[in-house]
Image (cartoon, rainbow, N blue to C red):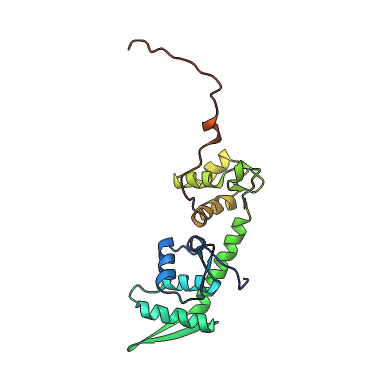
Amino acid sequence: MPGNELFAPAEIGAVAGVPVKSVYKVIEQRLPAGLVVRRNRQRLLTRWGAVCVVIDHEMPKDVPVSVRRQVYAQIKESMPSRTITCKHGFLQYVVDVKTAANKVDADLAKYRKAMRLIVEDPRVQAGAATFKGTRILVHQIANLISQGATGPELRADYPRLTRAMIAAATVYVKAHPRRGRPRKPVWRNNEPLSERTLERHGA
């Protein structure tokens, strides 16, 4: 993985299965400077910052914040390839950094592969996210999944959908949440094609 690659908190949350609120908590309260980069008023995680988020999520809940900060400071300074040890009072904590880093790299590789199935082309569906080579809206498929639609049902209604596309839809909407109010459909500003008055009988 390129060492200078940066990731949005929502991306890491979706990829690693960590709640976005937990990702921001680690960023704001535990990570040392240097593992988080600010660009255009947005906080982005470095690869090692993402590794720390995964470690933090998998640590037992009773591990003190001070210990977590020490662990992440060591990771920043040495970028270990295996384990690091941190002492707190009479206790000693051993963190398997290599396993966490391998997990992050594997999850991100799957994420990149899934995102290659999705495009945002201004010429297709007004630039909304669609599956490559189709006009199928990613958010629409994700909404159907959230409502209980199964893979076979979706493929029956959308024959061009693949299992990989269906899996990518859920990850995409988590990593790229919509902001603000939904856009009004184009047809909402158009004049009606025809009008008809109906009379009620027996009222």
Vertical placement of residue 92 versus 32, above or below: below
In the image: residue 165, left or right of residue 75: right
- Residue furthest to the bottom in view is 90
Q: Quadrant of residue 60?
A: bottom left
Vertical placement of residue 151 versus 32, above or below: above
Q: Nearer the viewer, residue 57 or 159?
A: 57
Q: Residue at x 55, y 29 (%)?
A: 190
Q: Residue at x 41, y 85 (%)?
A: 86
Quarter containing the N terminus: bottom right
- Residue furthest to the front in view is 40
Confirm whether residue 135 shows in the render.
Answer: no
Query: Could you say where residue 4 lies in the image, as x and y percent from the top left?
Result: 61, 71
Query: Could you say where residue 140 lies in the image, as x and y percent from the top left?
Result: 52, 43
Q: Residue at x 32, y 89 (%)?
A: 90
- Residue furthest to the top in view is 202
Q: Residue at x 60, y 61 (%)?
A: 112
Query: Could you say where residue 201 lies in the image, as x and y percent from the top left?
Result: 37, 10
Task: Report the number of numbered marks.
Answer: 0
Confirm whether residue 84 shows in the render.
Answer: yes
Query: Could you say where residue 173 lies in the image, as x and y percent from the top left?
Result: 51, 52
Quarter containing the C terminus: top left
